[in-house]
Amino acid sequence: MTKTSPRRLRAYLIFGALVALGLAAWIALTALQDNIVFFRSPTEVAENPPAADRRFRIGGMVQEGSVVRDGLDVAFVVTDFNAVITVRYSGMLPDLFREGQGVVAEGRLHPDGIFVADNVLAKHDENYMPPEVAEALQKAGKMEVRP
């Protein structure tokens, strides 16, 4: 029977620890993948629609004249000035939600092309817009870059 040198034993332990750490990281990332919610602009959704069961956030400006209310059910159009997506939401909208303002809605795109939101966020003052929305509008050339 041969005896393993301390140096070789240490190398095996380090290798084993790295394998265990990599396996733990892979398991954590796989588990979190289902909970990650990605942001998309209306143009990105129109060009590459996500799977119907995939949750994501859509953001842009609420198109003027597009808000239709029926009790707690609301339908409105979100635009990045290149494409539009109709959003349906059932519930209380934020107090600052209005036409011509920035909005981010979280939910799923149904096969009929309507985005059904279960959460709607509106900007909280005239100087704030969700970073994703601002970036999408800047790409569309509809918003100036502020210093």
Image (cartoon, helix red, strand yellow):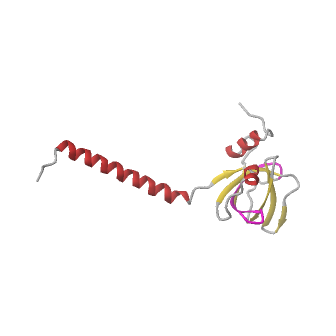
Which residue is outermost to the top?
147
- Expressed as whole percent of the image width and height from the top left, the position of residue 42 reads 76, 52
Work out which quarter of the rendered image holds the C terminus and state it.
top right
Instruction: Write the residue at 75% across / 52% down.
Output: 47
- Which image quadrant for residue 58? bottom right
Classify residue 63 as left or right of residue 139: right
Which residue is outermost to the front?
1
Which residue is outermost to the bottom?
71
Q: Closer to the camera, 145 or 3?
A: 3
Which residue is outermost to the left?
1
- Expressed as whole percent of the image width and height from the top left, the position of residue 92 reads 74, 63
**Up-down relation of residue 42 to residue 88 (above or below):** above
Q: Is residue 107 magenta?
A: yes
- Expressed as whole percent of the image width and height from the top left, the position of residue 80 reads 79, 47
Classify residue 31 as left or right of residue 142: left
Question: Mostly what secondary structure, the magenta segment?
Answer: strand
- Expressed as whole percent of the image width and height from the top left, the position of residue 50 reads 68, 58
Mark yes or no: residue 59 visible.
Answer: yes
Q: Is residue 56 magenta?
A: no
Classify residue 26 as left or right of residue 84: left
**Up-down relation of residue 119 to residue 21 (above or below):** below
Q: How many marks?
A: 0
Mark yes or no: residue 103 visible.
Answer: no
- Which image quadrant for residue 112? bottom right
The stretch in magenta equals 99-118
Instruction: Write the residue at 40% across / 54% down.
Output: 23
Instruction: Write the residue at 75% across / 60% down.
Output: 93
Work out which quarter of the rendered image holds the N terminus and state it.
bottom left
Instruction: Write the residue at 50% across / 58% down.
Output: 30
